Amino acid sequence: MRIPHACLDISAGIRRLVFDTRVFGLLLAICIGVLSGYGAILFHHVLQWAQYVFYQQRGDILGFAAAIPGWRLALTPALGGLIVGLVVHFGASEARGHGVPEVMTALALKGGRIRKRVALIKILASAVCIGSGGSSGREGPMVQIGSSIGSTIGQYFRVPVMEQRTMVGCGAAAGIAATFNAPIAGVLFALEVLVGDFGLASFSPVVLSSVTATAISRHYWGDLPTFQLPLYEIRSLWEFGIYPLLGIFAALCAVAFISTLYKAEDLFAKLPLPNWLKPAIGGLLLGGIILQWPHAFGVGYGGMNMALTGQLSGLMLLTLIAVKIMATSCTLGSGGSGGIFAPSLFIGAMCGGFFGWAAGQLFPAVAAPSGAYALVGMGAVVAGTTHAPITAILIIFEMTGDYKIILPMMITCIIATLVASSLREGSIYTIKLRMRGIDISGGMEQNILRNLRVGRFMTPNPAIIPQSMPLIDIIATFRNADVSYLHVTDADENLTGIISFRDIRPIMHEEALHRLVIAQDVATRDVVTVRPDDSIQSALRVMSTHGISQLPVVRHGADRRVIGTLRQKDVLAAYDKAVIRREIEDS
């Protein structure tokens, strides 16, 4: 029986479609979305289990804090910190802290490759940390968990480097979307903060992954708002003049949070204790805080809902801003595991709530209830810490389902981002990378070259001639030394110029000049040099700017004695060696 030609054409078309690289990438994105969605479900259950093990309670701390003995509430975070320190120390050091900078590091330095074990270790470490009372959020762990899943799938199918980065973005978007029931914000976070590419090749897979993960989370948890919302409406156009001031106040709170967090990290780094013990010290400090202010326990959704519904006094709102900053700094600065997104939301809710309370005292006829300002403040502080205002606006909108707040949210988030970025360069994510010498805008190649030094890869003992050498000897030196450049020095051996073969070619056949012309007559005097402590990246930039393929290397400071030469092929060799070494370390 012969198969009709139409059927053969359809079959061939299906095969071409399945094996088309773009379609294959979309299928992988859906797979990442499914796994990340179930990863979020697993993380949620492990977190609930961890809290039950520590406190025999699954609800919000504000509902059962009074029933917990004071000594237990004070000491349990220290026990959780000790467990986290051991898990991270023996499992994966990348699971320490809030996770997003580690994903950025993988994208900037490793082409999006993340170790396979990171997802499992991060689930365990963050669940224990938050479940025992650690003041951190769930979004950082889920970004890292989802990114690890995306990276693992990309590595398994050996996708190219650019697609590997997209796979990591798919996992991050899926993690955010499933955790907060916010598919649009998940996409924007992955593209705005991590990948930095809004092209169709990256956008389509990230959207598919985010939607898939959201569908899975809604199947299990429903499509309900995360927070209890106040009744909100714009009372007067004059109110739009109040929100910019909230943006400035939120920016100040965001900068205070960033500065305190990294100051605490520096202090814990200086402690003469093993790293695995430091989270226990942070947990002990945290225990003293939540004993007095249980609102700072864990993610803190209970306290946020109280601020949104106007159940907290102005003094308590102001106090909880400082309390949450200190609690989160103790948790994450000591090496605990969790995210900074939920603490930013908490600080923002208290910041906005206090501002709304003050505005109500000053302008009772104009200002909305304090809960409305708390809602806007949540987005503003997130925007100020992450420098991602679009993500902040959309995630609050999706978490609340209230469109009425969008105009004040847009004004406040943009102002908070501008003020925070002018007060302190870098977001809460990129500051940590800069402390490690990583610039995510440069990509993997630039970051590798930035950490390599000229002195390690230069060619020593370059060809040096005195500036009084006659032309006939210069010609002989080129012939015998087989070099492209001669370095001209004075009586003190300081570099005064450089001669290439092109410099002497026009006069080398003029025998009458062979004894009359000396090196300083034909040398290029304006010589660009590098020093042994300069980075290979800066040397490569100098070569590119001046259109040269070789640079003299002189000693430190004002000393102009030549100690070597850096050639373009030395730069390429340095990069190749660094890439090979990194591949070996990551394998």
Image (spheres, rainbow, N blue to C red):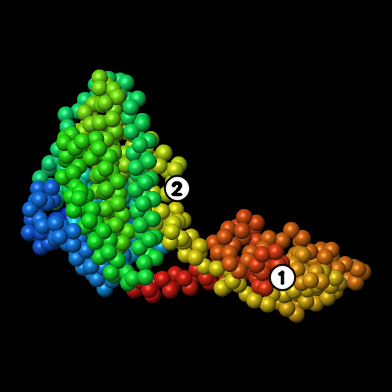
Residue 198 visible in this rendered orientation of the protein: no
Q: Quadrant of the C terminus?
A: bottom left
Q: Residue furthest bottom?
A: 480
**Element type where label 2 sits in the image:** loop
**Where residue 520 sits in the image (x, y, percent)?**
82, 65
Is residue 272 shown left or right of residue 51?
A: right
**Where residue 449 sits in the image (x, y, percent)?**
50, 64
The amino acid type found where label 1 is placed reads Arg
**Where residue 391 sits in the image (x, y, percent)?**
30, 43
Residue hosting label 2? 425
Quarter-of-image position of residue 91? bottom left
Determine the residue positioned at 77% across, 65% down: 496
**Element type where label 1 sits in the image:** loop
Contact flag, marks 2 and 1 (Cβ < 8 Å): no
Instruction: Check the image and report above or below for 552 versus 322.
Output: below
How far is mark 2 from mark 1, CA to CA?
38 Å
Determine the residue positioned at 67% across, 73% down: 563
The amino acid type found where label 2 is placed reads Glu
Residue hosting label 1? 561
444 or 376: nearer the eye? 376
Q: Nearer the viewer, mark 2 or mark 1?
A: 2
Instruction: Check the image and report above or below for 547 versus 457.
Output: above
Quarter-of-image position of residue 349? top left
Quarter-of-image position of residue 460? bottom right
